[in-house]
Structures are given as C-alpha cells and as structure tokens.
Amino acid sequence: AKAALRTASDAEFDRALTRERDELLRLLRECDWDTSLAATRLGVDRSTVYRRARRFGIELPRSGRGASGMGLAPIGRQLGANASSSLV
C-alpha cells in the first residue's frame, strides 16, 4: 500500500513538472524568447528563468534577443543571396 501511495505522488509530481515546463515554454514563445520579459511576467529574476530552462532542458538564445538568437537566420540568409533575388 505504501508503494502505491509513493507511485501516485511521484506521478503527480511528474505531471506538475510537465505543466511547469510547458508553461515556461509557452511564455518564452509568447515573449519571443526574451528572458527578461518572461521573468517580469513570471515575477521572478531572469536568473530563475535560466535555471528553470536548464532544469527542463530548454535551450535559450546565447546572445541578443528573440528567435534570431535561436539559430533562425533571416529568410535571405537561409536561401542564399542568389535565391533571395529570384523571389522578387
């Protein structure tokens, strides 16, 4: 009986962590990966956002702000200089 209670509480804990991770991801996306803005909305220090992201395995931009820091190049650079001119 004791093991069953422990398993139930472990499962509940796992669900809570999953909800926290999903909420952090949702908020970071809404804030265009701006950790300062996400921290302000959460009411925590920016270091807390970094710590939680690291705990959940969420990769944050290394420099600058927004999705461009996530390795997403502007469309012209993704296609190359010649390809972007053919889109005109």
Image (spheres, rainbow, N blue to C red):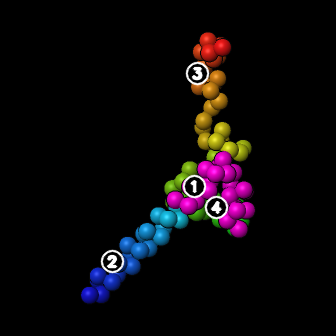
User: Is residue 9 part of the magenta span, yes or no?
Assistant: no
What segment is highlighted magenta in the picture?
22-43
Residue bearing the label numbered 4: 49
Residue bearing the label numbered 3: 79
- Residue at disc 4, secondary structure: helix
- Frontmost of labels 4 and 1 is 1
Q: Residue at x 66, y 14 (%)?
A: 88
Q: Label 2, label 4: how many angstroms apart (C-alpha)? A: 29 Å
- Residue at disc 3, secondary structure: helix
As drawn, which residue projects farthest toward the front?
Answer: 88
Judged by its main secondary structure, the magenta piece is helix
Q: Earlier in the sequence, mark 4 or mark 1?
A: 1
Q: Earlier in the sequence, mark 1 or mark 2?
A: 2
User: Is residue 24 part of the magenta span, yes or no?
Assistant: yes
Q: Label 4, label 3: how many angstroms apart (C-alpha)? A: 33 Å
Are discs 3 and 1 less than 8 Å apart at CB? no
Q: Label 4, label 1: how many angstroms apart (C-alpha)? A: 13 Å
Inspect this view and state whether residue 12 appears: yes
Instruction: Say few, some or many: other residues with alpha carbon within 10 Å of mark 1 (under 14 / 14 to 19 / 20 or more).
Output: some
